Amino acid sequence: MTPAGRIAASIGLLDRILTGEAAEHALTGWARANRYAGSGDRAAVRDHVYDALRRLRSLTALSGANTPSGRALLTGHLRAMGRNPEEMFTGEGYAPDPLNAAERVKLRAAPGADMLPELVALDCPDWLGPQLKDSLGNDFAPVLEAMRHRAPVFLRVNARRGSRNEVAVRIAEEGIETRTTPLASHALEVTAGERSIRNSVSYQQGFVELQDASPQAAVEALPLKRGMRILDYCAGGGGKSLAIAARADCDVTAHDAEPRRMRDLPVRAARAGAAVRIAKSDLQGQNYDLVLLDVPCSGIGTWRRDPDAKWKLTPEWLSDLLRVQEEILDQGSRLVAPAGTLAYMTCSLLGAENGGQIAAFLDRHPDWRLVEERSFTPLNGGDGFYSAHLTRV
C-alpha cells in the first residue's frame, strides 16, 4: 500500500468506528478482508486509527470541521505532523479524494495547535474536564497530554519460570527487546519486537504475560502469605489471578459475573504452571483471607490503549458504574474472613471511582478501616490505576 492508500483505508475505518463499531473489531475485520495488506501496512493503518482516536477533538479542530469524520481526522492528523493534507488527498490510485472547496475553506480558517482551548488541545471531553482537574490537581495537564500518545507495552515475567533477568535474555533471543522498570519487580517494558510477543515460544510456554506495570505493582503490594484463600471476585480474563498465583502458593479462586470472560483462564494457568480454580457455584457463605475487587470502571486510566472508550463514556454511564462499584464493595466485604483483607482496584483516574468510593464504603461500614491506598498515573510510566486495602477494625 502507498502512504496515501493507508490514509484512505484509515478514513474508512474511522468512519465505521465513529458510528459505534469497536475499534479493534473494525481493524480485525479490515485486515481479514484485505489480505493484500502486509504487516507494515496493517501496523501503519492501526497507528493512524489509534492516533486519530486519541486526539479526536484536537485533530477535528485542526481540520476546521465542526464534527469528527474520517476525512477530518486524517486532515487534522497530517496538519499536526506539519504536512500539507493536499499532498495525500489527491484521488490518484488508492489515495483519498481531493479536498473539496468547503474543506479547503475550513482548513485555511482552522486555528493553529497553539490556539486551541485547553480541553480541546488535551483531547478531554468537556463534561469530564472539571472532575479530572479536581482528581489530578497539578498533574491534570501533564497526564492528559500523556494520554494523547501511545502507551508502552509491558510484560509480566512469570516468577515460576525464571527471574526477570533470565527471561529478558531468553526473549531477546526471540527478537523481543526489553528494559526493566522500577514500577514492578517482575515487569519488563518492551522496546522492540512487540508484534512478535504472542507468537513467541516464551509467551506460549508461560514465561511472560502481557500486563501493564501499574496493575503488576498493585498485585505486588497485596499482603500474600502461603496457604491463603484468595478470591479474585471480578476476575475478567484472570490476569491478576495469574499474577497472584505466580507470587505465592495460595488457594486462588477466580470469579466473574460473566463467566465467559474467564474462558481462556484454564489454558493460560496451565501454560504458566499456576493453580487457579474457577468458581463454579454461588459464593454465599464462603469467606476468604483476601478478596480482590478489580471493579468495572470508566477505564480512564487506559485511554491510551482504548481511546474510543474516551468518547463513548457518558455522565449516565458513569453514574451507573458508581452504583455498581458500591454494590460490589458491599458484596465483596461479606466474603472476607474476620482478619482478612479487602482489596479494591480500578483502572480509573477519577476520584469518585477511587477514594470517593472508599470513603463512602467506610461511612456505610464503620467496622472497617483503610490500611493503605496507592495511585498511579501515566506519569509513573504505566496506566492510570488505583488500589486500596481495607480490613475490619
Image (spheres, grey):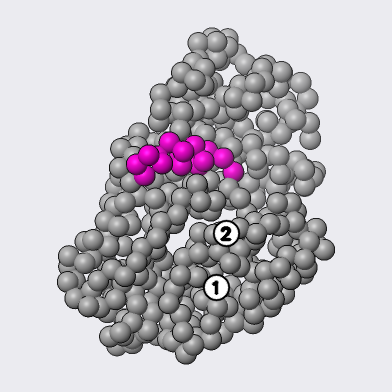
| Mark 1, residue position | 243
Query: What amino acid type is highlighted by mark number 1?
Result: Ala
**Closer to the camera in the image, 90 or 216:** 216
The amino acid type found where label 2 is placed reads Pro
Residue 265, compared with residue 72, is above or below; it is: below
Q: Quadrant of the N terminus?
A: top right
* Residue 65 appears anywhere in the view: no
Q: Pointer 2: what residue?
A: 182
CB under 8 Å between discs 2 and 1: no
Determine the image quadrant of residue 52.
top right
Q: Residue furthest bottom?
A: 227
Q: Main secondary structure of the magenta part?
A: helix
Across and down, in percent, residue 61 comes to 48, 23
Residue numbers of the magenta segment: 136-150
Q: Does 148 appear in magenta?
A: yes
Tell whether position 187 is magenta.
Answer: no
Residue positioned 61% across, 63% down in the render: 187
Within 10 Å of disc 2 (Cα), the crowding (few <14, some 14-19, many 20+) is few
> Which residue is more in the foreground, 284 or 334?
334
**Mark sitting earlier along the chain (2/1):** 2
